[in-house]
Image (tube, rainbow, N blue to C red):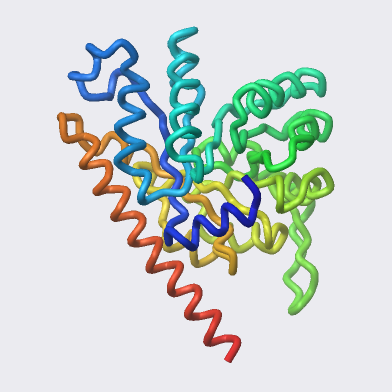
């Protein structure tokens, strides 16, 4: 999917919601366990219910790999179902790959050639040659980990790489933390047309610093809902004129109910988020018009 196709979907549906398919066999409704493929049965129902309210889906590979070969079959069935029935939805494989160049090239072949998935999350720690093999596929995306939503993100991602520079009115912003160095350096590898960044919703005002370095790239934002991130803060500091955001919600939507009404309740939760996103998008558009006047 191209950048313009993604933007068109966002403004057509008035949504930048990504539904995370973190499908845990221990959390899905009990009546599905009699199905030959419970993970896929759950995913299919969730997808059918939430598709009108989101623009993307993000299956997390860990929840499928835990089941061995059968888990991979469930994952592949989920991807094919999306591609056949909802081809306008952006598909993200949350796999967090990244290794030496020849290994990354094999990962890229798996997800971009064999499965034709739109985007893959990639860890940047091993540097340029571990990331660039994923960037050789037109209309496919690398989503690079930058500033994540978990508590442990403070262990390395916010480490100071330079002494903090005193603020200068109108002066150039000088990155001084490790995650900022990742944002700065990686722009030499990819572009806003093929690279996004993971930034956790729990980071709040840090989105303003991130936008100083990557003003045009899309951000994949996990952490709203169950993790406590604020959608309003994310939009206040991170939204651009093209939206520039894919905000992920997993548990708060897919596990909102464990009865036979689970899909209906998931649809209701997704619709609530979509309506909030529509208001935020409309507010942004209105503010831009006022500024132009």
Outermost residue, front side: 84
Quadrant of the rendering where the C terminus is positioned: bottom right
- In this rendering, the answer to whether 167 lies above or below 268 is below
Horizontal placement of 16 versus 31: left or right? right
Q: Residue at x 58, y 27 (%)?
A: 95
Q: Where does residue 182 sit, x and y in percent of width and height?
A: 74, 44
Q: How many marks?
A: 0
- In this rendering, the answer to whether 37 lies above or below 12 is above
Q: Where does residue 245 sit, x and y in percent of width and height?
A: 54, 55
Pick the front one: 241 or 78: 78
Q: Residue at x 75, y 68 (%)?
A: 166
Q: Where does residue 19 sit, x and y in percent of width and height?
A: 41, 41
Pick the front one: 164 or 213: 213
- In this rendering, the answer to whether 271 lies above or below 127 is below
Q: Residue at x 31, y 36 (%)?
A: 254
Q: Residue at x 43, y 72 (%)?
A: 282
Quadrant of the rendering where the N terminus is positioned: top right
Q: Where does residue 9 sit, x and y in percent of width and height?
A: 51, 55
Horizontal placement of 281 versus 175: left or right? left
């Amino acid at each position: 999917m191209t950048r313009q196709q993604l933007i068109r979907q966002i403004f057509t549906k008035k949504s930048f919601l990504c539904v995370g398919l973190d499908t845990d066999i221990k959390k899905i409704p009990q009546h599905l366990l009699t199905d030959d493929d419970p993970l896929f049965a759950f995913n299919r129902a969730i997808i059918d219910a939430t598709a009108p309210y989101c623009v993307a889906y993000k299956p997390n590979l860990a929840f499928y790999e835990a089941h061995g070969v059968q888990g991979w079959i469930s994952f592949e069935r989920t991807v094919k179902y999306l591609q056949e029935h909802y081809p306008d939805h952006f598909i993200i494989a949350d796999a967090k790959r990244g290794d030496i160049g020849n290994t990354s090239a094999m990962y890229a072949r798996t997800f971009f050639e064999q499965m034709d998935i739109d985007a893959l999350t990639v860890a940047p720690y091993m540097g340029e040659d571990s990331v660039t093999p994923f960037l050789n596929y037109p209309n496919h995306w690398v989503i690079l980990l930058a500033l994540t939503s978990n508590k442990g993100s403070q262990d390395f991602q916010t480490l100071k790489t330079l002494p903090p520079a005193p603020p200068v009115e109108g002066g150039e912003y000088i990155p001084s933390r490790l995650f900022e160095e990742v944002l700065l350096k990686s722009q030499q590898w990819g572009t806003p047309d093929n690279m996004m960044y993971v930034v956790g919703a729990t980071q709040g005002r840090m989105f303003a610093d991130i936008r100083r370095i990557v003003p045009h790239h899309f951000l994949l934002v996990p952490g709203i809902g169950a993790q406590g991130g604020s959608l309003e803060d994310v939009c206040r500091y991170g939204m651009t004129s093209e939206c520039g955001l894919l905000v992920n919600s997993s548990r708060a939507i897919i596990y909102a109910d464990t009865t036979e009404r689970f899909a209906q309740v998931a649809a209701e939760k997704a619709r609530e988020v979509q309506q909030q996103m529509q208001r935020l998008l409309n507010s942004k558009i209105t503010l831009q018009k006022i500024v132009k006047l």
